[in-house]
Image (cartoon, rainbow, N blue to C red):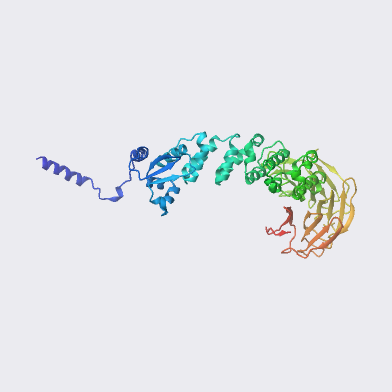
């Protein structure tokens, strides 16, 4: 009777519950089982149960299990699969490892958990890096990030530098730059490697009271090797990180000029002389290395691109706008002082903007950035548009262009306090050319001649001799309305097709 009932139940179960369809199967997991395994593994480690290898650190014995060590550390996986002596030894000595911190490392390998504290952080990071336990390295970096401040960012920077850990390096460098005014008093600064010092001092985010503070820290680092004098071999590299033109002229003359690191080094002396030129001859500022004359982001000075006038959908504009690339902000300045006019040319001396010519115009204007106003200057001898204007040696030059009758080859020169005067001529009359000033010369690229032919000629006007020559290397193609600029002593010509040929 009981047997029949049982058979009936089984038959009923099989009739109504068909488990033969694999599509109905589901995967299940047991967190309790995973946790139990971890707990048992850690218990085996602590009690020495089922261990097959003993690690000896500072005389302290750690019974372990090869398979778990290999699973949790690429270092041990490589050791136990290398075929070397350690594969067969039951006892392995680990040198230059702190046993107290190693206990934390083993606990993490077996459990995936770790309690990080500031006193063990550096050693824990080093051991995690040594034993190639990336998850533990990442947790150390996370702790660094959450607890880093001005008192420990340099130590973190050195640690990251030693172990080539790029993420920690960037985090600590950014904080060092932010707290630069504090870390100047930290002895760890003088312990930084050459590359670390370079990276910190070159960073545009550096927050300092002035560029003189950067100079002082560079000298402090150079002098920190005592009587050995080895660091002086790197002094030009360090000095290059200082934006000398951003240092006040008085400080340059009173302090920098007395520094043997600067004055006794040929390249350092050149940096000093360029900084003096920056202050004394504003028209040459564009000739300096772009890094040297780019202000720090926290500087009271800042670089701006100025947009003057231009053609709109409904006509010509007289608006003047300033754009800061570091903030992405536009600011409106005082509008152009003349009626809507196109094809004028602009140039810069120091912080002031000069505008000349335009359609049927010989007018010459200066925008005084200090007073934020436009001032009328002496008129050009010849009204012109589509011309070039560039600053050299505290003078402005206008070259070529169109006077409503013909394309011009004449050159005029203006120096502050004087009128415009003739200053030679170009080899060929040209309009709508690209142009740039560099090293006492003004280069003119392509343009259109009197026969309305677009050329690929490169003319070079010497401002010292007031003569012009044609360079043997023409542009790759005939073009006009080109843009040109100087970057790190190389001339870049931007064509209508979007190409960027380099002229050196």
Residue 339 in view, yes or no: no
Q: Residue placed farthest to the left in the image?
A: 1
160 or 32: which is nearer to us? Answer: 160
Residue 120 in picture, x, y percent from top left: 50, 36
Q: Residue 317, relative to residue 103: is it above or below?
A: below
Could one spot residue 159 in this view of the protein?
A: yes
- Nearer to me, 230 or 441: 230
- Image height of 421 relative to 256, above or below: below
- Estimate the x, y position of residue 66 in percent, counting from the top left: 38, 47
In terms of image quadrants, where is residue 369?
top right
In this view, the residue in front, 279 or 219, is 219
**Going 42% across and 42% down the picture, which residue do you hit?**
56
Which quarter of the image is occupied by the C terminus? bottom right
Camera-side residue: 412 or 187?
Answer: 187
Residue drawn 52% across and 34% down?
A: 119
Q: Quadrant of the N terminus?
A: top left
Left or right: residue 240 compared with residue 396: left
Quarter-of-image position of residue 333: top right
Q: From the viewer's perspective, tell me whether residue 112 is left or right of residue 151.
A: left
* Numbered circles on residues, count: 0
Task: Tell me where residue 140 appears, x and y as whole percent.
Answer: 50, 39
Is residue 28 found left or right of 151 in the rendered image? Answer: left
Q: Give percent across and percent down for residue 181.
A: 67, 35
């Amino acid at each position: 009777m009981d047997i029949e009932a049982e058979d009936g139940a089984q038959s009923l179960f099989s009739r109504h519950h068909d488990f033969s369809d694999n599509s109905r199967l589901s995967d299940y997991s047991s967190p309790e089982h995973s946790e139990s395994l971890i707990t048992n593994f850690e218990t085996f480690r602590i009690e020495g149960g089922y261990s097959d290898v003993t690690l000896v650190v500072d005389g302290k014995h750690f019974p372990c299990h090869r398979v778990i060590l290999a699973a949790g550390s690429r270092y041990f996986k490589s050791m136990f699969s290398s075929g070397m002596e350690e594969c067969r030894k039951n006892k392995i000595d680990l040198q230059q490892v702190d046993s107290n911190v190693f206990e934390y490392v083993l606990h993490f390998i077996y459990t995936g958990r770790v309690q990080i504290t500031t006193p063990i952080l550096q050693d824990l990071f080093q051991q995690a890096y040594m034993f190639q336990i990336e998850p533990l390295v990442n947790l150390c970096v996370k702790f660094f990030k959450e607890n880093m401040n001005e008192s420990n960012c340099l130590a973190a920077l050195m640690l990251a530098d030693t172990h080539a850990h790029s993420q920690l390096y960037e985090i600590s460098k950014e904080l060092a730059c932010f707290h630069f005014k504090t870390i100047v008093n930290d002895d760890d600064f003088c312990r930084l490697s050459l590359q670390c010092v370079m990276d910190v001092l070159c960073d545009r985010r550096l927050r300092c009271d002035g560029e003189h503070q950067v100079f002082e820290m560079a000298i402090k680092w150079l002098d920190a090797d005592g009587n050995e004098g080895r660091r002086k071999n790197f002094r030009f590299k360090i000095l290059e990180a200082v934006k000398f033109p951003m240092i006040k002229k008085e400080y340059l003359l009173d302090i920098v000029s007395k520094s043997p690191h600067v004055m006794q080094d040929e390249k350092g002396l050149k940096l000093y002389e360029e900084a003096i030129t920056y202050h004394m001859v504003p028209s040459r500022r564009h000739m300096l290395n772009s890094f040297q004359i780019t202000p720090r982001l926290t500087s009271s000075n800042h670089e701006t691109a100025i947009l003057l006038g231009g053609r709109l959908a409904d006509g010509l504009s007289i608006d003047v706008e300033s754009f800061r690339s570091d903030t992405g902000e536009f600011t409106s300045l005082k509008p152009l002082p003349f009626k809507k006019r196109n094809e004028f040319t602009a140039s810069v001396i120091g912080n002031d903007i000069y505008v000349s010519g335009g359609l049927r115009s010989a007018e010459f204007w200066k925008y005084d950035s200090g007073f934020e106003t436009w001032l009328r200057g002496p008129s050009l001898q010849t009204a012109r548009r589509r011309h070039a204007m560039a600053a050299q040696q505290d003078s402005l030059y206008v070259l070529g262009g169109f006077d409503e009758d013909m394309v011009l080859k004449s050159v005029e020169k203006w120096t502050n306090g004087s009128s415009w005067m003739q200053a030679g001529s170009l080899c060929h009359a040209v309009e709508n050319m690209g142009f740039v000033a560099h090293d006492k010369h003004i280069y003119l690229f392509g343009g259109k001649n009197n026969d309305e032919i677009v050329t690929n000629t490169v003319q070079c006007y010497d401002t010292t001799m007031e003569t012009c020559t044609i360079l043997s290397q023409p542009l790759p193609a005939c073009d006009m309305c080109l843009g040109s600029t100087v970057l790190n002593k190389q001339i870049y010509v931007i064509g209508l097709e979007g190409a960027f040929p380099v002229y050196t």
